């Protein structure tokens, strides 16, 4: 008796099924992988924050007097922060849209999210140029080093997030996502929300926390 060997392969072992949601309500492998990756990212940024507080606590004055008037919320950093927070909402709107198979709303919100992320990067780059012209550079003592290290690493993560979301957008335009197959969207949104939360902490730390 001859049996087709393909019929013996369970559906859940196929490459395509591996990216589908678990009908039993469990966490899929792509989403679980992203959660584990974000755990390592929490430890990474936690180390950077710890180093910042250590340097701040041992400095006689923070920020140094010559830079107290340099870090301004307006006209770039404040609006850039609002745009990044807004992008987190549009990203979640895209997730909710694809969950209900609304591909039009998904593509629209994901496009806006990518555009806001790019705008944030452009505004951060412009702010770097402005700060450099006012004397705050990477070599401006411990304050300059810690400032650019924290914001620079975050900017690199935003750049990575923009690439990730752009790939998701491209795949969405190709019709590769549906209400039953969108774990890549869920994973990318988790990463983007994480990047947003880290920036809120950085913004509060660098611009809102009183000096000493």
Image (tube, grey):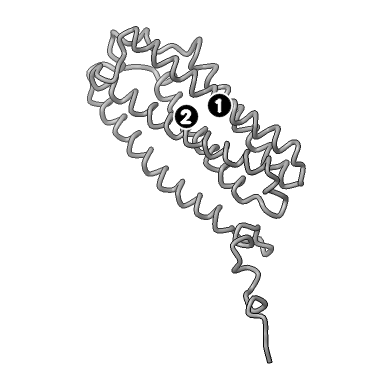
Secondary structure state at the residue bearing disc 1: helix
Secondary structure state at the residue bearing disc 2: helix
Query: Which residue is rendered at x = 51% and y = 38% of the image?
Result: 194
Q: Residue 22 falls in which quadrant of the image?
A: bottom right
- Residue 148 lies, with reference to residue 126, above or below; the image says below
Of 210 and 31, nearer the camera is 31
Residue 165 picture location, percent across and down: 57, 38
- Residue 62 lies, with reference to residue 146, above or below; the image says above
CA gap, disc 2 to disc 1?
8 Å
What residue does disc 1 label?
84
Q: Are marks 2 and 1 in contact (CB under 8 Å)?
A: yes
Q: Is residue 206 left or right of residue 212?
A: right
Q: Which mark is residue 199?
A: 2
Outermost residue, front side: 2
Q: Residue 209 falls in which quadrant of the image?
A: top left
Query: Which residue is rendered at x = 50% and y = 54% of the image?
Result: 33
Q: Residues within 10 Å of mark 1 (few under 14, many from 20)?
A: many
Figure quadrant of the N terminus: bottom right
């Amino acid at each position: 008796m001859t049996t087709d060997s393909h019929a013996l392969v369970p559906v859940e072992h196929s490459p395509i099924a591996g990216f589908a949601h678990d009908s039993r309500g469990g966490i899929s492998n792509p989403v679980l992988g992203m959660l584990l990756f974000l755990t390592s990212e929490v430890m990474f940024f936690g180390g950077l924050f710890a180093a910042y507080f250590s340097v701040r606590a041992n400095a006689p004055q923070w920020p140094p007097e010559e830079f107290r008037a340099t870090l301004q919320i307006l006209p770039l950093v404040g609006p850039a922060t609002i745009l990044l927070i807004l992008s987190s909402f549009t990203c979640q709107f895209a997730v909710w849209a694809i969950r209900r198979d609304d591909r039009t709303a998904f593509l629209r919100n994901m496009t806006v999210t990518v555009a806001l992320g790019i705008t944030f990067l452009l505004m951060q780059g412009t702010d770097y140029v402005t700060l450099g012209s006012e004397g705050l550079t990477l070599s401006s003592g411990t304050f300059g080093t810690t400032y650019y290290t924290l914001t620079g690493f975050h900017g690199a993560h935003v750049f990575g997030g923009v690439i990730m979301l752009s790939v998701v957008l491209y795949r969405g335009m190709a019709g590769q996502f549906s209400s039953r197959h969108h774990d890549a969207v869920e994973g990318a949104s988790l990463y983007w929300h994480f990047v947003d939360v880290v920036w809120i902490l950085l913004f509060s730390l660098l611009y809102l926390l009183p000096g000493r």
